[in-house]
Image (spheres, rainbow, N blue to C red):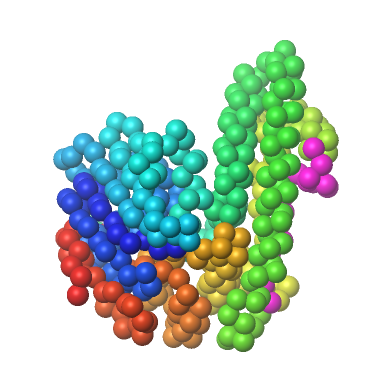
């Protein structure tokens, strides 16, 4: 899949900009603060329906204006398709001219894998970042997962509201929420577990024969102990932690507290890995994400690389570039990159204006 063109209106520091992309390599370069990441941010809206940089859509509206509009034309293995995101007081999304009822209907439509300078956080940070990674990954190959996840978080919120009231005569209400939480929760556990299995099958094959020889393995550490796919087991654990849940006013068991650990040659990379090993690990993780999306959907995802090439040393950079030449790649950088790719378009960005060279 690839994006043919993008139109930005009142988005961040852009007035009205059209960019025609190459189906292969696109290099967007320019000084700091000129609007490179803003383009990546706009593109990613079509994958997730929201910004990867801010929580409030309105922050992306150009200062002094009251709406933004981004429109993109894609070519997928199903043919041409277009999407429009319009944000004023509310957000509205149109897919091939049809207004979507729910944002979740957009997820899974356009697959993208994004790589930003804070990528090492995937290893270094707390479990939330890893859950986000796995959730976004599965949502792209199984849109039903995303819908399930939204329902799970909705039920979780209701259950936590009951817990916060600290009134034990709400027990019967709690029973209802527990039942719903466990039904949705086991599905999430099951899909996360098989996604991690799939990554383990793929991660040591991508770019095989490269300089990264260490064997990488992910281990799922679900919050529900024992058989995490068994609803009764889940229910039992919710039931036994009720006292503690009431005390804390939150639900302490469930997929919202899951994590996974990453091992390199049986060494826990978060605890003992070097900076370079962490880099290699995330590179491979991202490449296997691309591979699996391609395998499961029959279409290559679009790869967005925001300012990361300069982060990589010569060897990793070579490894990475060799492994991405089958898909559309959109790279931003501050210095014009010299990349030997067929069909390579180069754009210079200056103060919210994009000029094709
Ligand atoms: N809502 C907005 N309205 C107008 N301008 C904005 C808005 N939000 C951000 N900007 C401007 O966009 C610019 C930042 O754009 P962006 O993050 O894309 O820069 P960049 O080219 O990626 O820079 P760097 O190389 O430092 O990463 C800044 O000049 C900022 O003031
Ligand atoms: Mg930037």
User: Which residue is found at the position 17% from the left and 50% from the top?
Assistant: 15
Q: For residue 337, what is the image quadrant?
A: bottom left
Query: Which quadrant would the C terminus be assigned to in this image?
Result: bottom left
Residue 114: image quadrant is bottom left
State how many labels appear: 0
Q: Name the residue nearer the viewer: 51 or 78.
A: 78
- Magenta residues? 215-231
Residue 58 position within the rendered picture, expressed as x and y whole percent measured from the top left = 30, 39
Reply yes or no: does residue 347 show up in magenta: no
Percent from the top left, x then y, of residue 351?
16, 60
Camera sees residue 265:
yes
Residue at x-position 29% and y-position 59%: 5
Q: Is 227 in the magenta?
A: yes
**For residue 141, above or below residue 21:** above
Q: In the rendered image of this protein, does residue 279 appear above or below residue 156? A: below
- 42 left or right of 245? left
* Quadrant of image for the N terminus: bottom left
Asked whether 154 or 145 is in front, the reply is 145
Is 114 situated left or right of 344 in this image? right
| Residue 248 at x, y percent in the picture | 65, 31
Q: Is residue 333 visible?
A: no
């Amino acid at each position: 899949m690839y994006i043919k063109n993008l139109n930005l209106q009142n988005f961040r520091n852009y007035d009205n900009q059209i960019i025609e992309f190459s189906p292969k390599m696109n290099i967007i370069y320019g000084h700091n603060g000129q609007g490179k990441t803003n383009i990546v941010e706009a593109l990613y809206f079509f994958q997730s329906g929201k910004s990867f940089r801010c929580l409030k859509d309105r922050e992306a509206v150009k200062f002094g204006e009251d709406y933004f509009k981004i429109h993109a034309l894609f070519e997928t293995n199903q043919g041409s398709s277009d999407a429009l995101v319009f944000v004023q007081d509310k957000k509205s999304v149109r897919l091939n001219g049809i207004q979507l009822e729910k944002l979740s209907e957009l997820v899974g439509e356009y697959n993208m894998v994004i790589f930003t300078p804070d990528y090492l956080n995937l290893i270094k940070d707390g479990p939330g970042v890893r859950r986000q990674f796995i959730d976004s990954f599965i949502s792209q190959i199984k849109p039903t997962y995303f819908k399930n996840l939204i329902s799970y978080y909705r039920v979780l919120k209701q259950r936590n509201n009951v817990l916060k009231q600290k009134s034990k005569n709400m027990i019967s209400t709690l029973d209802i929420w527990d039942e719903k939480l466990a039904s949705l929760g086991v599905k999430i556990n099951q899909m996360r577990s098989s996604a991690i299995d799939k990554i383990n099958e793929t991660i040591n094959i991508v770019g095989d024969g490269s300089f990264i020889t260490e064997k990488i393995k992910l281990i799922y550490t679900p919050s529900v102990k024992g058989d995490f796919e068994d609803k009764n087991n889940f229910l039992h654990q919710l039931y036994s932690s009720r006292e503690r849940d009431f005390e804390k006013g939150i639900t302490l068991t469930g997929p919202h507290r899951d994590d996974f650990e990453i091992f390199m040659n049986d060494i826990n990379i978060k605890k003992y890995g070097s900076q370079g090993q962490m880099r290699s690990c995330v590179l491979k993780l991202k490449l296997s994400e691309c591979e699996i999306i391609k395998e499961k959907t029959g279409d290559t995802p679009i790869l967005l690389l925001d300012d990361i090439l300069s982060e990589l040393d010569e060897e990793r950079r070579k490894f990475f570039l060799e492994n991405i030449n089958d898909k559309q790649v959109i790279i931003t950088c501050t210095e014009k990159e010299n990349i030997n790719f067929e069909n390579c378009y180069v754009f210079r960005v200056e103060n919210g204006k994009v000029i094709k060279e």
